[in-house]
Image (cartoon, helix red, strand yellow):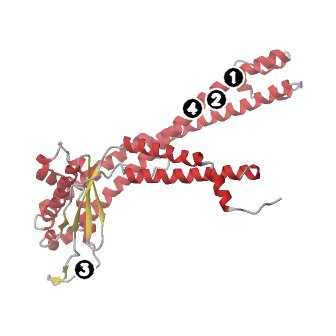
Amino acid sequence: MDHPFHFSLYLKRLGRRWKLILLPPIAALLIAILFSWLTPVTYTSTAIMVAPKPQLVWRWDNKVYDVVDIRFDWRSEVMPLVKTPKVAELALAQVGGQLSRAYTPEEVMNATSVKSGAGSTFTIRVKASDPRDAALLANAMAQALPQAVADIYAGSADAFAQAKEDVEQQFNDWDERWRRFRAQYGIGLGFTGDITGVGEDQLVGNQAAIKQELTIKSSEVAALRSFLDKINLALTGLEHGGKANAHLALLDESMLARYGQPLETLQELPPDALKATLTSLQAQAQADFDAANQDLLALQDRVATILTEREHIQRTRGVWYESVKAMENKMAELDVKRIVEGQRVHQVGEAQVPDKPSQPNWPLNLALAATAGLLGGFFLAVMAVYFEGERAEI
């Protein structure tokens, strides 16, 4: 018989399960504390830059008109220059002696990120284990960028040629890495494109080797799984007092030969001896299956690693390729722009020493853990009350 629902009584039943509600949040908080404690402490400092739209438009009558070209986003040309060795070297030259430790240009580039902002602004963010280092490097990068841009656009064609050469060198390095990668693993697994100096026969051969290894190992695992199933059928027939000959006939003779058990010999054995032999055979096949399956999983992990590496190389190579093309397309514009535009980029927001680390974010981690834990605990309590049903005493 259905009873009317009383919300207050339902809350009382939930309240009696307060331990069930609190345990998940406590566990989640402990995990969040451990995770945050193990996360390296990192501070982030941000410098705000502005790059107004160009006000120079070149005409075929060899005159420069002072109008705003709204079709061109100056930031898209300036922002990629932030993460270049030249800017990192200029920044380190300014504050190298003030930092808590020595940094390489590569470390500074890896610790720096650039993001578009509102209007013509963009931000330069630098991460470091020391908060003062983060602020010093962010401001130094912000001050070095206009200097590097000035070298490129304010009259130094040689500086631009050097910057272009640096970008081309980065592309050539990744292109060579891509060539070596394809030479090692072939064109299979989704690899495409022509690589100079590597014969197609070699690429196909490397591809076939990987695929053949996967196919052989997969076939071995499938054959052992099928062989085990048939042995189980034969053992089931013996356990139920039936004859196993019908099931024995299904066993693959090549697999029996692998374990030195000819089919004719098994068919002549009495039931007890046959059962013991099949049990021993089952144990051997199971051990081989487990080993082969582990090898297959390891091989699949290897292929997944190869694919991940391929994607990383292709993506990075593509970024540098686009950078090279972009710099080539801008060569014709530099003769006009470098006169004035190099001085347009400037810093409008100074990076401050952060008073707290950006990583780990203790409040966020603990809040997320507490929220998820409470929701989980409340869900468990509701499910407990639901399954308890009407048997519970109010």
Q: Which mark is residue 283?
A: 1
Q: Residue 96 location in percent, x, y?
A: 13, 48
Residue occupying the point 64% across, 54% down? 12
The residue type indicated by label 3 comes to Asp
Whole-angstrom CA distance, mark 2 to mark 4, is: 8 Å
Residue 262 drawn above or below residue 344: above
Residue under pointer 4: 294
Whole-angstrom CA distance, mark 1 to mark 4, is: 17 Å
Residue under pointer 3: 69
Is there a contact, CB below 8 Å, between mark 3 and mark 4? no
Q: Earlier in the sequence, mark 3 or mark 2?
A: 3
Is there a contact, CB below 8 Å, between mark 1 and mark 4? no
The residue type indicated by label 2 comes to Phe
Residue 188 visible, this orientation: no
Residue 298 drawn above or below residue 12: above
Q: Earlier in the sequence, mark 1 or mark 2?
A: 1
Is 216 left, or right, of 371 in this rendering? Answer: right
Q: Which mark is residue 394?
A: none
Residue under pointer 2: 289
Residue 328 drawn above or below residue 170: below
Q: Earlier in the sequence, mark 3 or mark 4?
A: 3
Q: Nearer the viewer, residue 90 or 64?
A: 90
